[in-house]
Amino acid sequence: MDRAPVLAITGQVKPQYVGPGSFQEIDQDALFNSFCVFNKTINSGSRTTELVTLALRHALVKRVVSHLAIPNNIRKEPLEADIEPMEGWIPDLRISNTGSIGRAVGLIEQAERPVIIAGGGAKD
């Protein structure tokens, strides 16, 4: 995924049906823990906003995969929640000084043997 932020949301059976001996059960925690930085199950409707916010923050700020499992009983509950603003958490990817970039391009074009040292986020 090349450090693309991802929020995976999956369904889950009711908590009483999770575990060994359950019909068509897979261990979602083990599966998603193998590659997710944030992996939670929403077991209470009152925690939905909190966990969705945390999952989004992990995915967007750390540029990783976050996962939320939502059991059938929680998914069917009505949700009354305020949407929390994410200001300050989402990186601003706008270019603020296009003049500097133009000068850098000119210098690179004129160089005989240019070298660019770039970090992991340079592809972004």
Image: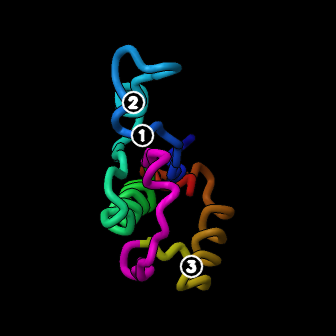
For residue 117, side relative to residue 111 (left or right): left
* Mark pair 3, 2: CA separation: 50 Å
| Disc 2 packing (10 Å; few <14; some 14–19; many ≥20) | few
| Residue at 36% over, 46% down | 41
- The residue depicted at 64 percent of the width and 77 percent of the height is 102
User: Is 57 covered by the magenta stretch?
Assistant: no
User: Mark 2 near mark 1, Cβ–Cβ under 8 Å?
Assistant: yes
- Front residue (pair 44, 114): 44
Residue 47 picture location, percent across and down: 31, 63
Query: Relative to 93, does residue 2 appear above or below in the rendering?
Result: above
Residue 115 seen in the figure: no
Nearest the camera: 99 or 61?
61
Which comes sooner in the sequence, label 1 or label 3?
Answer: 1
Question: Could you say which quadrant of the image residue 124 lies in?
Answer: bottom right
In the foreground, 1 or 7: 7
Amino acid bearing label 3? Ile
Residue 14, label in figure: 1
Identified by mark 2, the residue type is: Tyr
